[in-house]
Structure formats: C-alpha cells, structure tokens
Image (spheres, grey):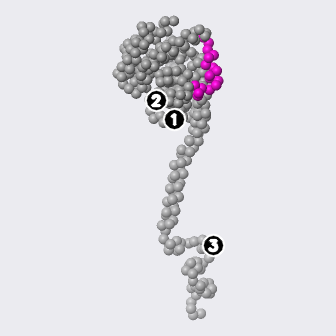
C-alpha cells in the first residue's frame, strides 16, 4: 500500500524541529568568522557572564562593560578552546579576569561607546518605575557586597539565572556540594542584611 | 513594592529588554573587526596549511639531491659524458684540457694514428 492511500496522523518526521547547535558547533563556526554563530553564543551565555560580572563589580554599567570586553576577548582567543563542552567555564574565567582588571584600574564606564551611553537612559518604562527599580537594585547590590565574590556568583547564578548546582559547580570550578554551601551562606547573609523581606529559599 | 524585595529579580537584566538588547548590539559591534579578520584568515589558512608541508617536503627533496650530488666522486664525474661532449668536442680533447696538457695539435687530431707512417 502506497503512502498516498494512508490516512491518519502524519509521521512525526514531517514536523521535525531543527537541532539546537551545540557550543562546539557554534565555536567552530565563530572561529571561521561567522557572525551569526558568535551571536548565538553571545545570546546563550551573556546572562551567565552578566551575573558573574555583576557579582564581581557590583555595578550594572561596569558589568556590561566587562561582558562586552570579555566576549570580544573570548572571540580573539577562541582558538585556545580545547574543550568546547567547557566553554562557559572558560568564558566566565575571562569575565572574572576582565572584572578584576576593571576594578584595578578604576576605569568606570570609560570603555562604553558614546552611542550606548546615550541609549542607556532611553527606556520604555516610566521614570518613577525606574527610580524604584534603581533603589531596589542599589539595596540588593549593597547587600551583596557583604558576600564573598564566589557567594555572590553562586547566588546570582542560582537565584537570578536559574542555574542548577551542577551547572554552577562546573562554571565556578568547584563541587556541587561546595556550590550548595556557598548558596546557603550567601542567602543567610542576605537574609540577615535585608531582613524578612528577602525570601531566598534555603538550599534544596 | 515589597514583592520585589522577595528575591533578586531586580538584578535580572531581562527586566530591561531594551538595555539588554543594546548590550548585545554593542558587543556584536565590538566583535565585528575580529569576525572580519577571521573570515579573511580562514580561506587563507586553508591554502597555507597544505602548502607548508608541501614546501617542507620540496625543501627536503632538494636537500637530498644536493647531498647526493656532492657525494659523487670527482673521477666519476670526470668520466661521465659532459657538456663538452654534448657539444661535439672529442673526449680526448676534453681529458687533455682538464689535465692541463699542451699536446700538439696533430696528436689531438689523430690520437690513434700509428707512429710509423
């Protein structure tokens, strides 16, 4: 019986979803200068890079500068990636190094291009909302300052980015158990600093 | 806005999509030069990569030929047919010239002629 005579649901293969490219595949293409591959890598890992940069610098603008710098540095050094499956850990180390350099040289916002500096204040939400958000951010960042850099990274990656302990352990270069401990201590410190309004759940 | 205090969501960059997209755009723009360099270097590398071992192999082969040439004894090279012979100069004359002899012309012209004529 031919396919034309069949009735019923279409085969599953007809609605096949294209596979999500792996980091290894994207890295290989980015090495050849393919912009869309770099773009995909950036979109995939920028949030984690930002969390680490924010944990290290404690400032949104500095964190953005660090992220931008780190991604360009990573692209330049892409040939050094020997284990593409560990790309994110390698990238986050670059982020830490760039953040360290930024802090050391006290170059606040100096690397930000002028057009971006003009773009930043142009946001859709109202000024009242922005001010409220800024105040909350300021208090949270101030509280985070009391944590160790690793605690800050773990708390931000877990609570803001929704990473698992395993992912955090791989990215931070520690064990899952140690990541849990860092999260526990970090949250406890935040609760002590922010009061009962901070509802960070205890480590599951 | 107490519920915002309940977590760290104010620190989530996704809360400000415009700002986030601006960061991505800036990073992409900053990477453009390096991407262009890589796009150019890729095809070049594809040509250079096989050419390098080929050049090395050629250099080794040329070195081998030179070493072989130097190893041939002088006498052997002298006995081998040379340019002079190829140009039609008699072998006897070539040998004589190489030895520095000043033989008479009749000897060179008639090297095998009998003494008693």
SS label for mark 2 = helix
Q: Which mark is residue A93?
A: 2
Q: Residues within 10 Å of mark 2 (few under 14, many from 20)?
A: some
- The Cα atoms of the two marked residues, 3 and 1, are separated by 64 Å
Magenta span: A109-125
First in sequence, mark 1 or 2: give its number: 1
Residue A25 or residue B113, whichever sits in front: A25
> Is residue A201 covered in magenta?
no
Residue carrying label 1 = A77
Query: Which mark is on residue A195?
Result: none
Q: CA distance from mark 2 to mark 3?
A: 76 Å
Circles 3 and 1 on the same chain: no
Q: Is residue A24 left or right of residue A110?
A: left
Residue at 57%, 43% (x, y): give it.
Answer: B47
Tag 3, which chain? B
Q: Which type of secondary structure does the marked residue at label 1 adopt?
A: loop
> Is B40 left, or right, of A172 in this rendering?
right
Which residue is disc 3 drawn over? Answer: B87
Q: Position of residue B89 (x, y in %)?
A: 62, 76
- Picture coordinates of residue A81 (x, y %)? 47, 34
| Residues tagged by mark 1 and mark 2 found on one chain of the structure | yes
Give left or right: position of A48 versus B16. left
How many C-alpha atoms fall within 10 Å of the one at disc 1: few (<14), some, or many (≥20)?
few
What secondary structure do most residues of the magenta stretch adopt?
A: loop
Q: Residues within 10 Å of mark 3 (few under 14, many from 20)?
A: few
Residue at point 54%, 34% (across, down): A76
Q: Give the camera-side residue of B73 and A47.
A: A47
User: Which is more foreground, mark 3 or mark 1?
Assistant: 1
Q: Is residue A19 visible?
A: no
Chain ID, mark 2: A
């Amino acid at each position: 019986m031919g396919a034309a005579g069949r009735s019923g649901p279409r085969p599953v293969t007809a609605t096949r979803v294209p596979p999500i490219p792996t980091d290894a595949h994207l890295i290989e293409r980015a090495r050849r200068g393919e912009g869309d591959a770099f773009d995909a890598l950036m979109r995939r890992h920028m949030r984690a890079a930002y969390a680490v940069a924010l944990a290290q610098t404690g400032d949104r603008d500095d964190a953005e500068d660090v992220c931008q710098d780190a991604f360009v540095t990573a692209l330049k050094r892409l040939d050094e990636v020997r284990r593409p499956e560990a790309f994110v850990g390698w990238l986050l180390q670059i982020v830490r190094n760039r953040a360290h350099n930024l802090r050391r040289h006290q170059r606040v916002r100096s690397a930000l291009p002028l057009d971006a500096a003009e773009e930043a204040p142009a946001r859709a939400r109202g000024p009242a909302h922005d001010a409220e958000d800024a105040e909350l951010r300021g208090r949270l960042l101030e509280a985070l300052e009391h944590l160790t850099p690793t605690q800050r990274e773990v708390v931000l990656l877990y609570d803001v980015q929704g990473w698992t302990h395993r992912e955090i352990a791989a990215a931070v270069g520690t064990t899952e158990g140690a990541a849990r401990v860092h999260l526990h201590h970090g949250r406890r410190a935040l609760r002590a600093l922010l009061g009962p309004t901070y509802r960070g759940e205890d480590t599951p | 806005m107490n519920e915002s205090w309940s977590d760290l969501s104010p620190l989530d960059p996704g809360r400000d999509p415009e700002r986030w997209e601006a960061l991505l755009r800036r990073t992409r723009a900053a990477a453009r030069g390096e991407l262009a360099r890589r796009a150019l270097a890729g095809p070049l590398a594809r040509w250079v990569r096989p050419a390098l071992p080929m050049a090395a192999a050629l250099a080794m082969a040329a070195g081998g030929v030179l070493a072989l040439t130097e190893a041939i004894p002088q006498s052997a090279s002298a006995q081998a047919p040379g340019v002079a012979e190829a140009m039609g100069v008699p072998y006897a004359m070539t040998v004589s010239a190489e030895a520095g002899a000043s033989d008479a012309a009749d000897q060179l012209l008639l090297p095998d002629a009998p003494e008693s004529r």
